[in-house]
Image (tube, rainbow, N blue to C red):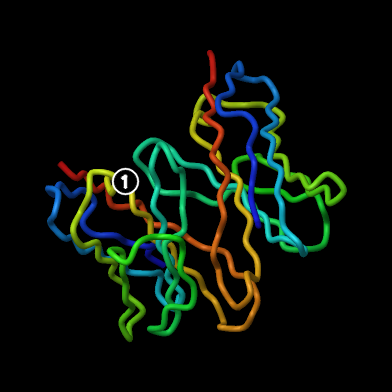
Amino acid sequence: AQSVTQPDIHITVSEGASLELRCNYSYGATPYLFWYVQSPGQGLQLLLKYFSGDTLVQGIKGFEAEFKRSQSSFNLRKPSVHWSDAAEYFCAVGGNYGGATNKLIFGTGTLLAVQP
Amino acid sequence: KAGVTQTPRYLIKTRGQQVTLSCSPISGHRSVSWYQQTPGQGLQFLFEYFSETQRNKGNFPGRFSGRQFSNSRSEMNVSTLELGDSALYLCASSPTSGRALYNEQFFGPGTRLTVL
């Protein structure tokens, strides 16, 4: 069955430090991969996506992610974290689950705290 | 373009009641999906509608139902509410062409349902 694992439930980084959030997926074919961010009381905002092609994808707010098929990973990175990046981050996988669908399977999320 | 809108934003109901939530997709989007978000279960897919037809359904009891209208607006209904139905319900729309290709989803702010 398709699944997404985010091994880090909570991460704290200092402002200006680099960030890497881990995501591993299980999916039989080439997946469609996403990172979303959610601020408290808000909906989900798409940071970036991978459908095909270049395995290093750039997103909004200075985020990037790298698709590594051999490791079934799609880790999110940012070279310098800002206090406004504090939020919850979700990795998700989409695909053709036996038919045309836009269904997403989400990981459990990583809550990011940023220290001044 | 206006984003995905959901009404109401907050709702309080008591056990045994029923509730209807509404979602207006981004103009031109024909696919609407619903997700339930709870602290214990995370983000879970409820169902997806495309051109007024349900084309995918998650693992939820029959008390959860939905529909889509000809203008692509969607409603979801939960009957006989239980305490465990308290959650943030998120709607997402997608500019799907209807082919078996994945299309990214754009999320609304959600409806916070509290069941007492």
- Parent chain of label 1: B
**How far from the left and from the top, in percent, is residue A6?**
63, 37
- Whole-percent x and y of residue B18? 16, 60
Residue B3 image offset from top left, x and y in percent: 39, 62
- Quick one: B29 or A2, which is closer to the camera? A2
Task: Check the image and report above or below for B60 versus A42.
Answer: below
Q: Nearer the viewer, residue B88 or A58?
A: B88
- Residue at the disc numbered 1: B87
Residue drawn at x 22%, y 49% is B82
Q: Is residue B52 left or right of residue A31?
A: left
Question: Which image quarter is the N terminus of chain B in?
Answer: bottom left
Residue B84's image quarter? top left
Left or right: residue A82 compared with residue B60: right
- Quadrant of the image containing the C terminus of chain B: top left
Query: Of all residues shown, which one is farthest toward the right?
Result: A70
Left or right placement of residue A70 versus residue A105 in this view: right
Q: Secondary structure at mark 1?
A: strand
**Can you give x and y, in whole percent of width and height, for residue B62 in the image?**
32, 67
Question: Front-most of A107 and B41?
Answer: B41
Which residue corresponds to the image point at 15% horizontal and 46% vertical from the top-left?
Answer: B12
The three-letter code of the residue at mark 1 reads Ala
Outermost residue on the top side: it is A116
Residue at 31% from the left image edge and 69% from the top image edge: B65
Residue at x 38%, y 69% (from the top left corner): B25
Task: Determine whether B47 is above or below A79 in the image.
Answer: below
Place residue A18 in its image quadrant.
top right
Badge 1 local density, few (<14 within 10 Å), some, or many (20+)? many
Front residue of B14/A116: it is B14
